[in-house]
Image: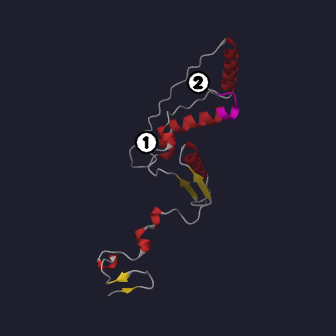
Amino acid sequence: MGQRSPQTGLCRGCPGSLTNFPNFKTDFDSLFPKRDLPPEHSDVVIIGGGIIGWSIAYWLKAKETRRNAIQVLVIERDNTYSKASTVLSAGGIRQQFSVEENIWMSSFSANFLRLINDHLGVVGEPPIDIQFNHSGYLFLASENEAAVLEENVNLQRRRGRREA
């Protein structure tokens, strides 16, 4: 009969043992290539690769003062991103807000998407087509609500929003 290896616990020469097959790998590290595993160290771990997660990762890396100064790991259940929440959403970007920070953030996001290839394009690769269609919203309001909307439009225009 065969003998069990003290290192691996596998039995060489035992009937039905996987080690009887010439292509069987006993080096378990080779079964799980390092490229498929997350890094052993990350400075920042982001859970979720939707619009917020990838945006945080992108800007952390874009603002680095030296290459690989910050190790960022994004954990997303769908590594192709084809079924990620943001990709499957309707994709509206509303820019008509009453809070200055929201006006700035939504304007910045819409501009980033319009110029996506300037930020994320790869030389020698086809342009990225995210099918961004810049269109507007239609708000219906009562007379009382219309006054609030008008105040919001005035604020938006003071903050540089032409589409308001």
Q: Which of the image's four quarters has the N terminus?
A: bottom left
Q: Which colour scheme is used?
A: secondary structure
Q: Residue at the location (66% across, 24% down)?
A: 157
Q: What element carries label 2?
A: loop
Q: Residue at the location (67% across, 19% down)?
A: 149
Q: In this view, does 144 lie to the left or right of 129?
A: right
Was residue 147 drawn as part of the magenta stretch in this picture? no
Residue 118 vertical placement versus 158 (above, below): below
Image position, residue 11 (x, y; %)? 37, 82
Residue 48, label in figure: none
Q: Residue furthest top?
A: 143
| Three-letter amino acid code of the residue under disc 1 | Ile
Residue 164 vertical placement versus 101 (above, below): above
Along the line of sight, the residue nearer the viewer: 65 or 89 = 89
Image position, residue 144 (x, y; %)? 70, 14
Q: In which quarter of the image is residue 45?
A: bottom right
C-alpha distance separating marks 1 and 2: 25 Å
Q: Is residue 50 left or right of residue 43?
A: left
Q: Specify the segment rendered in magenta.
A: 97-102
Circles 1 and 2 in contact, beta carbons < 8 Å: no
Along the line of sight, the residue nearer the viewer: 118 or 132 = 132
Image position, residue 47 (x, y; %)? 58, 51
Along the line of sight, the residue nearer the viewer: 119 or 95 = 95
Marked residue nearer the N-terminal end (1 or 2): 1
Q: Is mark 1 on a helix, strand or loop?
A: loop
Q: Which of the image's four quarters has the C terminus?
A: top right
| Residue hosting label 1 | 128
* Mark 2 burial class by Cα count in 10 Å: few <14, some 14-19, many 20+: few
Residue 15 vertical placement versus 117 (above, below): below
Q: In which quarter of the image is residue 16?
A: bottom left
Was residue 99 drawn as part of the magenta stretch in this picture? yes
| Residue hosting label 2 | 163
